[in-house]
């Protein structure tokens, strides 16, 4: 049974926007939870310590009053009567909002301060039974005790006087549960505020990240519609003040380069096809018209076909060389002696044509370059000069060090302090200003010199070699007076 070729639909995962917001909210929530737990844990601990301290202070006050004696005693004679001691203690000690007291003498209630305004009642059987159980003569015992709806922290302090045989007990209790309830109420308030903070942060973050990440959405839409047939789509950038927008800007620049490269390739293929079509048409036409029985016609056709094939081979070789110029190994750098390079160029240029060659090598030292590529470029310039000048005319070839001109600085990406300038100057036909840029393009030729043999790839090869050295080529030309080509090679890479 044949398998279905329908592609599986991949489930939509969370977007970057949702992931970022989720991460921020999770971290914010964890931070608020940790902060709340620590804060309220500290408050509960402080409450317990404060209650413990207050109970101990009450016991210290009773014992201090007992030792100090009645206020009207001139010699601070200690209290001799438990009843009088408890009365004096309850006179100066007022129970707090969550506090209640009870004093007992021999198990019977002596004093109950606070009247009907007491927060809770200690004079009940349950409390007295707990007091009787915890009471230890001469000691103060602190314990937790649940009374009705109150969670009490209570101290049972034994009180005895030297002149009184009765057993006194002071009971002080603080409603710790009520105070803990107040803290728990703050916990609820904090939780609501924290929840509101998370919700507001989530809503605000969703809007803000949506604006920040909008270029990513546009980028996704753009990449879905871009193909080799249409590279005009671009990502709209509303602001370039963040990394995401900068990414979209970089993507647009990449598309600009791709579009230019694809257009250049298409133009290159069109031009190559056009240039190759002519010799192929000539070859086919002559072969069709050739008289097989006429030996002279066969020889003439053979010579013409071979000549056209040689021209096609040169054209293909030049095309391959231009294609190779895009590779990193097109130029192989090595130290080159400038004077030796100049003398080598002089020897080779003299063999090109019957011209008055004026060669001067004024530069010395070494340069990091590809010797063979430089020779190839300069000889190509010299061959062009010979091609477009009269026999016996003067052609100058110079090798100098020079500072970069404004035109050079505009054309190179990383300027150098000085350049090795390889100059070829002729006194030939010159080039019209409107054609000065076109002749450096592939298959670009001057309209006034179409009859001169050539493929239109010589100068593009020279430019490719110069750019491979991070340099450039400049032209100064006057129609009817001649042209000056300068190849600028940086002295320091």
Image (spheres, helix red, strand yellow):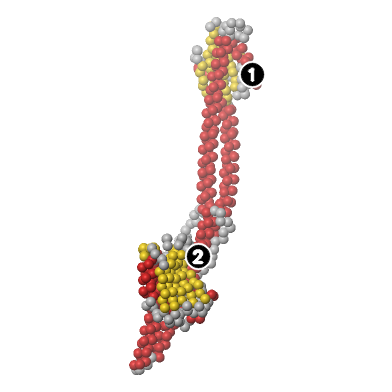
Residue 292 lies, with reference to residue 427, above or below; the image says: below
**Closer to the eye: label 1 or 2:** 2
Looking at the rendered structure, the number of numbered marks drawn on it comes to: 2
CB under 8 Å between discs 1 and 2: no
Judging depth in this view, the residue of 295 and 492 nearest the camera is 492
Badge 1 local density, few (<14 within 10 Å), some, or many (20+)?
some
What residue appears at the point 57 percent right and 10 percent down from the top-left corner? 68
Image coordinates for residue 333, horizontal then vertical, percent: 37, 64
Residue 350 in sight here: yes
Badge 2 local density, few (<14 within 10 Å), some, or many (20+)?
few
Image coordinates for residue 191, horizontal then vertical, percent: 57, 38
Using the image, tell me which numbered label, if any, was put on residue 273.
none
Secondary structure beneath label 2: loop
Instruction: Work out whether mark 1 precedes mark 2 in sequence or the reverse, and give the earlier one.
Output: 1
Image coordinates for residue 394, horizontal then vertical, percent: 44, 78
Image coordinates for residue 404, horizontal then vertical, percent: 48, 64
Quadrant in which the C terminus appears = bottom left
Judging depth in this view, the residue of 272 and 366 nearest the camera is 366
What residue appears at the point 39 percent right and 83 percent down from the top-left corner? 308
Q: CA distance from mark 1 to mark 2?
A: 103 Å
Judging depth in this view, the residue of 179 and 425 nearest the camera is 425
Q: Residue furthest right?
A: 116
Residue occupied by mark 1 = 114
Judging depth in this view, the residue of 201 and 294 nearest the camera is 294
Secondary structure beneath label 1: loop
- Residue 455 falls left or right of residue 124: left
The quadrant where residue 279 appears: bottom left
Q: Residue furthest bottom?
A: 293
What residue appears at the point 55 percent right and 24 percent down from the top-left corner? 51
- Residue 382 falls left or right of residue 55: left
Quadrant in which the N terminus appears = bottom left
Residue occupied by mark 2 = 405
């Amino acid at each position: 049974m044949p398998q279905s070729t329908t592609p599986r639909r991949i489930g939509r995962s969370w977007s970057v926007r949702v992931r970022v917001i989720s991460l921020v909210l999770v971290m914010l929530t964890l931070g608020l939870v940790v902060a709340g737990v620590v804060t309220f844990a500290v408050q509960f601990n402080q409450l317990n310590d404060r209650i413990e301290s207050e109970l101990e202070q009450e016991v210290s006050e009773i014992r201090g009053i007992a030792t100090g004696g009645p206020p009207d005693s001139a010699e601070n004679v200690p209290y001799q009567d438990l009843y009088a001691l408890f009365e004096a203690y309850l006179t100066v000690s007022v129970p707090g909002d969550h506090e209640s007291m009870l004093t007992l003498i021999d198990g019977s209630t002596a004093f109950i301060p606070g009247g009907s305004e007491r927060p809770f009642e200690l004079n009940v059987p349950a409390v007295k039974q707990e007091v009787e159980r915890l009471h230890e003569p001469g000691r103060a015992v602190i314990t937790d005790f649940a009374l009705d709806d109150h969670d009490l922290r209570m101290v049972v302090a034994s009180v005895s006087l030297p002149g009184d045989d009765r057993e006194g007990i002071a009971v002080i209790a603080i409603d710790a549960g009520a105070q803990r309830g107040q803290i728990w109420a703050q916990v609820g308030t904090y939780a609501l505020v924290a929840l509101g903070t998370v919700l507001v942060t989530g809503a605000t973050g969703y809007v803000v990240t949506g604006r920040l990440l909008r270029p990513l959405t546009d980028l996704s839409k753009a990449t879905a519609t871009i193909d080799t047939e249409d590279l005009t789509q671009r990502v709209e950038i509303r602001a370039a003040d963040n990394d995401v927008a900068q990414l979209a800007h970089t993507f647009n620049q990449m598309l600009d380069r791709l579009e230019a490269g694809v257009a250049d390739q298409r133009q290159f293929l069109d031009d190559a096809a056009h240039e190759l079509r002519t010799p192929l048409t000539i070859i086919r036409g002559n072969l069709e018209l050739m008289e097989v029985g006429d030996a002279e016609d066969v020889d003439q056709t053979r010579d013409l076909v071979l000549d056209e094939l040689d021209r096609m081979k040169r054209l293909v070789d030049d095309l391959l060389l231009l294609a190779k110029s895009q590779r990193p190994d097109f130029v192989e750098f090595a130290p080159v002696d400038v004077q030796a390079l100049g003398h080598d160029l002089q020897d080779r240029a003299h063999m090109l044509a019957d011209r008055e060659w004026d060669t001067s090598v004024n530069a010395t030292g070494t340069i990091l370059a590809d010797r063979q590529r430089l020779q190839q470029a300069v000889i190509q310039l010299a061959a062009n000069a010979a091609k477009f000048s009269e026999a016996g005319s003067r052609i100058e070839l110079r090798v100098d060090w020079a500072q970069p001109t404004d035109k050079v600085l505009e054309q190179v990406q990383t300027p150098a302090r000085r350049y090795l300038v390889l100059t070829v100057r002729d006194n030939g036909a010159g080039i019209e200003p409107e054609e000065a840029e076109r002749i450096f393009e592939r298959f670009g030729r001057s309209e006034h010199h179409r009859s001169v043999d050539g493929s239109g790839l010589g100068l593009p090869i020279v430019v490719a070699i110069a750019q491979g050295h991070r340099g450039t080529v400049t032209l100064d030309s006057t129609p009817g007076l001649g042209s000056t080509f300068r190849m600028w090679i940086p002295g320091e890479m």
